[in-house]
Amino acid sequence: MRVVFDSWALLALLKGEEPGAGVVLAHIERAERAGNDAAALHMSWINLGEVFYIVRRLRGEVAARETLENIRLLPLKLHEPSSEDVLNAARIKSERRLSYADAFAVALAQKFDAILVTGDPEIWALEDIVRVELIYRMNTRG
């Protein structure tokens, strides 16, 4: 099973916000145990950039860089978008109500026929075009 994380998923993990953090950690542990492409975790650099700027805004440059270094130690394949990936994300954005960065996560999940792990309500509404595993962070249910 291939999995794509969006920024929401990694932020849940980084903030330790349950139950989402536990779900994300379980995917990471499964990928570490499997050690093969079938269990791969994926993320777009666009979405990682979101994590970076959010951490930087809240905790500063040093914390953001340390967070980035720690994320890069995970069994997570980071993808720089190609021109085709950019256009696929743009198509999704033009047709659906979601942020441009979220469109990259959706496009990556489609590309790898992966499950998109997110708690983002904008993405929840896209279950007709992408498989979604819904997670929650504190104060997001309801």
Image: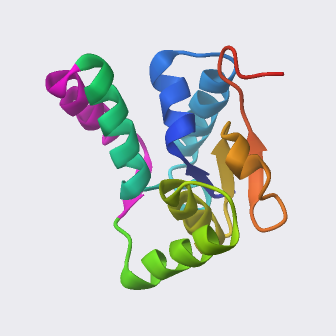
Q: Is residue 114 above or below residue 122?
A: below
Who's the residue at 80% across and 52% down the image?
125
Place residue 139 in its image quadrant.
top right
Q: Position of residue 11 (x, y in %)?
A: 49, 29
The residues colored magenta run 60-79
Q: Position of residue 79 (x, y in %)?
A: 39, 63
Residue sitting farthest toward the bottom: 84
Q: Which of the image's four quarters has the C terminus? A: top right
Whether residue 77 is visible: no
Q: Position of residue 43 (x, y in %)?
A: 47, 54
Place residue 103 in its image quadrant.
bottom right
Whether residue 97 is visible: yes
Who's the residue at 59% across and 16% down the image?
17
Q: Is residue 111 above or below residue 125?
A: below
Q: Which of the image's four quarters has the N terminus? A: bottom right
Of residue 5 and residue 95, the one placed in the foreground of this image is 95
Q: Position of residue 131 (x, y in %)?
A: 77, 58
Q: Is residue 123 left or right of residue 21?
A: right
The total of numbered circles placed on residues is 0
Q: Is residue 142 left or right of residue 97?
A: right
Of residue 25 and residue 58, the one placed in the foreground of this image is 58
Of residue 69 and residue 100, the one placed in the foreground of this image is 100
Who's the residue at 57% across and 36% down the image?
9
Magenta-span inclusion, residue 76: yes
